[in-house]
C-alpha cells in the first residue's frame, strides 16, 4: 500500500508576489500574468497605467538594456478581504548606453485577494539617477 500523496500548501501572499516578480524579471510577462487577476491595474513610475505585465516590460525595454531586482524584504499587511504586500529592495542592471548601475531603490506595493494580485504600484529612483547622469540636480 502506498502513502497518500501530500497536497501542496497554497502559496502565501508574499510567495505569490515573489513568484510574480521573478517571472517578470526573466522577463516573461505572460508567466507573470498568471499571478494576476485579469484587468489588474499596474501603476508604474510616473503614473503610467498598464493592464498586463507586458506594459512594464515594454517600458523597461526603452529605459534599460536589462534590469533586475534585488528583493531585500517583503512587508505583509493582512486585512479582512485582502493583503497588502510591499516588496522593498534595489534595482541593478545596465542603462541603454551600457553603463552598469546598482543600488537603485524601489518599492512595489501589491494588493492580493483570493490568491491573485489585483493591484500593483511601482516606485523607484531611476528618474532621479537619469537626472544626475545628465548633470541636473533636482
Image (spheres, grey):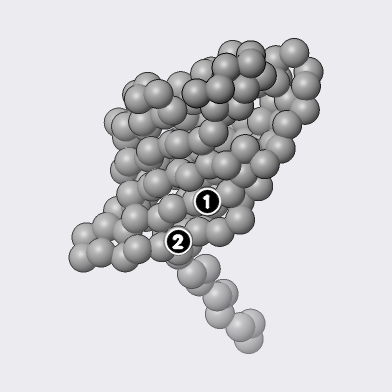
The residue positioned 33% from the left and 49% from the top of the image is 111
Q: Is residue 63 above or below residue 28?
A: above
- Furthest residue in direction bottom, as rendered: 1
Density class for disc 1 (Cα within 10 Å; few <14, some 14-19, many ≥20) is some
Left-right relation of 39 to 68: left
Q: Mark 2 or mark 1: which comes first in sequence? A: 2
Instruction: Please say whether residue 31 is visible from this viewpoint.
Output: no
The residue positioned 55% from the left and 75% from the top of the image is 6
Question: Is disc 2 placed on a helix, strand or loop?
Answer: strand
Question: Is disc 1 placed on a helix, strand or loop?
Answer: strand
Left-right relation of 117 to 82: right
Q: Is residue 38 above or below residue 113?
A: above
Q: Using the rendered view, name the quadrant where residue 50 is placed.
A: top left
| Residue annotated with mark 1 | 88
Whole-percent x and y of residue 39?
30, 31
Measured Cα–Cα span from mark 2 to mark 1: 8 Å
The residue positioned 73% from the left and 25% from the top of the image is 94
The residue positioned 71% from the left and 37% from the top of the image is 102
Q: Using the rendered view, name the quadrant where residue 64 is placed.
A: top right
Q: Are marks 2 and 1 in contact (CB under 8 Å)?
A: yes
Q: How many marks?
A: 2
Q: Is residue 62 above or below residue 18?
A: above
Whole-percent x and y of residue 96?
70, 15
Whole-percent x and y of residue 1?
63, 86
Front-most of 122 and 55? 122
Instruction: Please say whether residue 135 is visible from this viewpoint.
Output: yes
- The numbered disc on residue 75 is 2
Whole-percent x and y of residue 88?
52, 51
Density class for disc 2 (Cα within 10 Å; few <14, some 14-19, many ≥20) is few
Front-most of 117 and 121? 121
- The numbered disc on residue 62 is none
Amino acid at each position: 500500500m502506498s502513502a497518500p500523496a501530500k497536497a501542496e500548501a497554497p502559496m502565501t501572499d508574499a510567495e505569490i508576489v515573489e513568484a510574480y516578480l521573478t517571472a517578470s524579471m526573466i522577463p516573461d510577462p505572460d508567466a507573470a500574468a498568471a499571478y494576476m487577476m485579469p484587468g489588474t491595474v499596474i501603476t508604474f513610475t510616473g503614473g503610467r497605467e498598464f493592464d498586463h505585465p507586458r506594459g512594464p516590460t515594454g517600458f523597461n525595454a526603452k529605459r534599460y538594456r536589462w534590469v533586475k531586482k534585488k528583493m531585500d524584504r517583503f512587508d505583509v499587511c493582512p486585512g479582512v478581504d485582502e493583503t497588502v504586500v510591499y516588496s522593498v529592495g534595489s534595482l541593478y542592471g545596465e542603462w541603454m548606453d551600457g553603463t552598469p548601475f546598482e543600488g537603485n531603490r524601489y518599492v512595489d506595493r501589491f494588493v492580493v485577494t483570493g490568491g491573485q494580485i489585483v493591484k500593483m504600484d511601482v516606485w523607484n529612483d531611476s528618474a532621479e539617477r537619469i537626472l544626475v547622469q545628465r548633470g541636473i540636480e533636482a
